[in-house]
Image: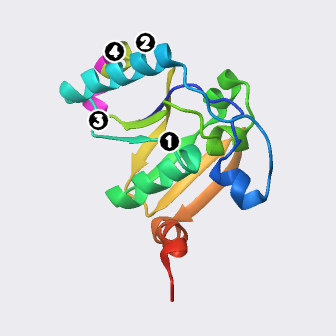
């Protein structure tokens, strides 16, 4: 299962999305130190207990990039639905996917560890958003509509494009 943890805010000041879209201004990501510490401690404890198969931070590019990097690094697909977490975060889908709010994590949790993981994460913002698949694609849905449905190879090519100096 795939979980997203942390709080998403409309923080695009200095973000990669702002750079790509030519936007100026906006709010820069702020750190809620107390919440960040609780998130890091909870995730670290779950890792030590073997309840997390893989974990990725949401930094440059936000959660959308973290999802893609996890998919092509693990050579597996993902099927995600961000509707509930988007609603609970009071943000639109674009903000949820591309904000660079601090302290957010994406965790892959084995099916056999879901109950323990969810109990351990009950005191922090953490949401089940999807599953790992054997398909060669990252699928992201929101509000009943597909937002992303791309093969891993395409995601990897897009990710590597800035490094192509040829």
Marks 1 and 2, the one that precedes in the sequence: 1
Q: Mark 4 — residue?
A: 120
Element marked by disc 4 = helix
Disc 4 from disc 2: Cα separation = 6 Å
14 left or right of 21? left
Whether residues under marks 1 and 2 lie with C-beta atoms below 8 angstroms apart, the answer is no
Q: Position of residue 4 (x, y in %)?
A: 49, 32
Disc 3 from disc 4: Cα separation = 14 Å
- Residue 112 lies in the magenta-colored region: yes
Q: Which mark's residue is nearer the viewer, 1 or 2?
A: 1
Q: Which mark's residue is nearer the viewer, 3 or 1?
A: 1
Element marked by disc 1 = loop
Disc 3 from disc 1: Cα separation = 20 Å
Q: Mark 3 — residue?
A: 110
Element marked by disc 3 = loop
Tag shown at residue 31: none
Q: Residues within 10 Å of mark 3 (few under 14, many from 20)?
A: some
Marks 3 and 4, the one that precedes in the sequence: 3
Asked if residue 1 shows in the view, the reply is no
Tag shown at residue 58: 1
Marks 1 and 4, the one that precedes in the sequence: 1
């Amino acid at each position: 299962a795939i979980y997203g943890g942390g709080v998403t805010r409309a923080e695009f000041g200095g973000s990669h999305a702002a750079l790509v879209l030519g936007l100026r201004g906006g709010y820069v990501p702020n750190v809620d130190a107390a919440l960040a510490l609780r998130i890091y401690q909870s995730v670290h404890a779950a890792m030590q207990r073997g309840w997390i198969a893989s974990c990725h931070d949401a930094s440059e590019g936000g959660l959308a990039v973290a999802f893609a990097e996890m998919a092509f690094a693990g050579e597996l697909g993902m099927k995600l639905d961000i509707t509930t977490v988007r609603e609970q975060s009071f943000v639109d889908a674009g903000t949820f996917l591309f904000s660079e709010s601090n302290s957010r994590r994406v965790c892959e949790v084995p099916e056999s560890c879901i109950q323990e993981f969810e109990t351990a994460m009950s005191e922090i913002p953490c949401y089940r958003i999807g599953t790992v698949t054997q398909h060669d694609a990252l699928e992201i849905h929101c509000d009943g509509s597909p937002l992303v449905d791309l093969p891993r190879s395409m995601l990897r090519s897009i990710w590597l494009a800035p490094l192509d100096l040829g």
